[in-house]
Structure formats: structure tokens, C-alpha cells
Amino acid sequence: LIFVQKDAQYYAAYGAALLVPWTTRRALYCQYICPHGAAQELLHYYAPSRLRIHLHAGIAAGLRWLPVLLLFVAVGATALVLPMDLAEIEPFDAYLIRMAGWGTLTIAVLGLIASLFVPMAFCKFGCPTGAFLEFLRSHGRSDHFGKRDIAALALVLFVAGVTVWHHTIWQWINGV
């Protein structure tokens, strides 16, 4: 019975993380739950102002596609059932010291260093979870077809393609 209660709490928390952005236009997970976002905020707050840089608009626009590309990697690895630990492309396990792998620790440290120079650098330019939740979040522009819709459509087409050609892709990856 205790196990069932934990599962219900687990699903309720994830359900809230998905439903709240969609219904309230607020990023619940990013603003209130993510430990890496809180650490970045603290570092940026206490960082000397001479360290802060302003990225050129073109560079920032290009970097904003990195989380979407990482989301494609995660969805592709999941759809192809690849033996890949998706926690390695996120810094969250770094805050669980005994569980953290080198990839997670490296991403966490690099994200924190970057946040000294650019506020919330990892959140803006590296977080696939934030990119996924951003797709879910309502922006009130539902009557306009924008970049967010193009990225979501591309992700759906990517998953459809991976599903249709799963066997061929799997053989190509394994060299069969």
C-alpha cells in the first residue's frame, strides 16, 4: 500500500509539472522545482557584475536551438531503445552526489560556470527538459503558427520516421 501511495505521488507531481504550464502559462518545474536553476540564480546573484556578458542576438538565437536538438536526441534514443542514460545530458543527478555520473557532473559544473557570465545560461541554452515544458506551456498565441509549433511538428515527424524505419535504423547503428 505504501508503494502504491509513492507511485500516486510520483505521477501526481509529474502530472502537475505537465498540466500547470499548459493551463497557467507558468513554468512550474523550472521556477520552483529544478535545483540547477536555483543554483544558477544564486551564482548569478553573487557573481561580480564585471563577469557578466551580453551575447550577440544572433549567437543567442542559434544557441536557443541546442535544447531542442538535445530533445531530439533524447526522443530518438528512447524511440530506438538505445542503451543511453538520458540523465547524462541533464545536470539534475549532480545534486544527488552518490548517484551522479561524470557526464552529469560535467554538465552541471559547466552550466554553473556559464551562469556566472550569462544569467540562467543552462536553462536558456542547454536544458532539454525546459524545452519540452516550453512546448507544453500556453503562450496565448494559439492562433499563430510560430517557431515553437514548427519545432513541435518536426519532433512529431521525427518520432514518426523513427517508428516507421526503426528496424533499418537499428541495423545501421549496430552495423548489421
Image: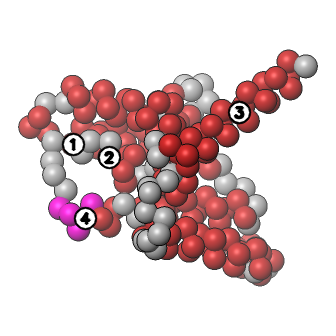
Measure the alpha-carbon separation of dots 1 and 3. Answer: 36 Å
The span picked out in magenta is: 56-60
Secondary structure, magenta segment, majority class: helix
Q: Are marks 4 and 2 in contact (CB under 8 Å)?
A: no
Q: Which mark is residue 12?
A: 3
Where in the figure is residue 137, as x and y percent of width and height?
A: 50, 51
What crowding class fits label 1: few (fewer than 14 Cα within 10 Å), some (14-19), or many (20 or more)? Answer: many
Q: Residue 148 carries which label?
A: none
Farthest residue in the left direction?
50
Farthest residue in the right direction?
1
What crowding class fits label 3: few (fewer than 14 Cα within 10 Å), some (14-19), or many (20 or more)? Answer: few
Q: Which mark is residue 121?
A: 2
Mark 1 vs mark 3, foreground winner is 3
Q: In which quarter of the image is the N terminus?
A: top right
Considering depth in this image, is 134 or 67 the residue closer to the camera? 134
Q: Is mark 1 on a helix, strand or loop?
A: helix
Q: Is mark 3 on a helix, strand or loop?
A: helix
Quarter of the rendering containing residue 136: bottom right
Q: Is residue 149 visible?
A: yes
The answer to which of marks 2 and 3 sits earlier in the sequence is 3
Where in the figure is residue 54, as x and y percent of width and height?
A: 16, 52
What crowding class fits label 4: few (fewer than 14 Cα within 10 Å), some (14-19), or many (20 or more)? Answer: few
**Relative to 54, residue 24 above or below:** above
Q: In which quarter of the image is the C terminus?
A: bottom right
